[in-house]
Amino acid sequence: MQERRLTIRTATAAAGLSLALLSPLSALAAEQIMFVSQGGAYQKAQTVAILDPAAKKLGITINQDSVPDAWPIMRSQVATGKPTWDVVDVATNFCLRGGEQGIVEKLDFSKMPNAAAMPAEYRSDYSVAYEFYSSVLGYSLKKFPDAATAPKTWADFWDVKKFPGRRSLRNNPLATLEAALMADGVPADKLYPLDVDRAFKKLEEIKPHITVWWTSGAQSAQLLNDGEVDMVMAWNGRISALTKEGAKVTYTYNQGILQSTSLCVLKGAPNLPTAIKFLNEAVDPVHQANLPLHIDYGPANPKAYDTGVIPAARVGELPSAPANAKVQALMSYAWWTSAAGEAAEKRWLSFAQK
């Protein structure tokens, strides 16, 4: 599971919503589901923005659980034949793998009009995108105070002569291979299928200049904030949190890699019909538009930007906003869950150990 911490934007969300509790509706509601997410500020924000409003509108009870890594538990629950979870918010690639392995339900989009209206690349037979974040190029304003001469592309990140300084990349192939290919001149909309040999060749070029290969979102932000590195690949919310605290850092969405978490339904979910109703409601445009009012994630349903709920100034900050999405690469989780993607992940381990 990809770990990302983003700041709550309202006092209401921070007031202390217990993740294992029921929604405000009566526990005697006839229909209920068990919803599982990743905890922390993120789950508190989605409770206020999406879960509570959806429960009220549908007249259901939403019980919640939170785990940092749902995938092994998803597998073990289905293996028992009596899963207790219904809807899981998890990295999109796990939804796809779950579909391939018989761990999540195949979705009937005729019963989910909100989801069916979303772009085809935002959904699959087994998943619906729920929120977006981006892997972006962040840099120190102390090192690069002039926007005109600051790094703007992955080619700039790779150019150690024109842009001297300490660098950091994530110790994970997802997004890192995409960045390497864009640095080598591959257009953002022509990345897939990834040319893995070309990507690793490009990574070998920059490897001697990488000060730290980070392993957590918190580490990536701290490296930049503390001045240990001058530029970094990081999740947009990590750097935006620093800027709100007054740190002299910034980032660009140009050539960012747009990534998502998705909702999927566990195979044999005990409350399957209600789970499907909830999944459709969770991607309702208005509910989706509420999410970025509380946390630095972008709505997955593009129609959220047509609701008027998100202030114009806020729209410009979000990774999935049309203008920002336009200059980024949309990660293909289908490729990453293919045999080629799994081979690339294994190859990364040997690359990282050398």
Image (tube, rainbow, N blue to C red):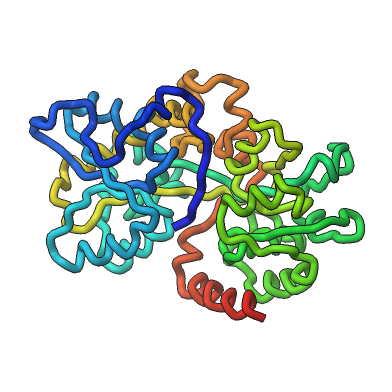
Residue situated furthest right in the rendering: 161
Query: Which of the two residues, 208 or 261, is positioned nearer the viewer here?
Result: 208
State whether residue 174 is above or below residue 3: below
Where in the figure is residue 297, as x and y percent of width and height?
A: 51, 37
Where in the figure is residue 43, as x and y percent of width and height?
A: 38, 39
- Asked whether, in this view, residue 38 is left or right of residue 281, the answer is right
- Asked whether, in this view, residue 228 is left or right of residue 328, the answer is right
Residue drawn at (78%, 51%) of the image: 230
The answer to whether residue 332 is visible is: yes
Query: Which of the two residues, 45 or 340, is positioned nearer the viewer here?
Result: 45
- Asked whether, in this view, residue 153 is left or right of residue 238, the answer is right
Task: State the quadrant of the N terminus.
Answer: bottom left
Residue drawn at (62%, 60%) of the image: 214
Query: Which of the two residues, 276 or 148, is positioned nearer the viewer here?
Result: 148
Query: Which of the two residues, 308 or 252, is positioned nearer the viewer here?
Result: 252
Instruction: Indicate the quadrant where residue 27 lies.
Output: top left
Instruction: Indicate the quadrant where residue 275 lies.
Output: top left
Residue drawn at (80%, 58%) of the image: 166
**Numbered label tally:** 0
State whether residue 139 is above or below residue 245: below
The answer to whether residue 329 is visible is: no
Where in the figure is residue 87, as x and y percent of width and height?
A: 27, 47
Residue drawn at (53%, 77%) of the image: 346
Task: State the quadrant of the C terminus.
Answer: bottom right
Where in the figure is residue 300, as x and y percent of width and height?
A: 46, 39
- Asked whether, in this view, residue 276 is left or right of residue 179, the answer is left
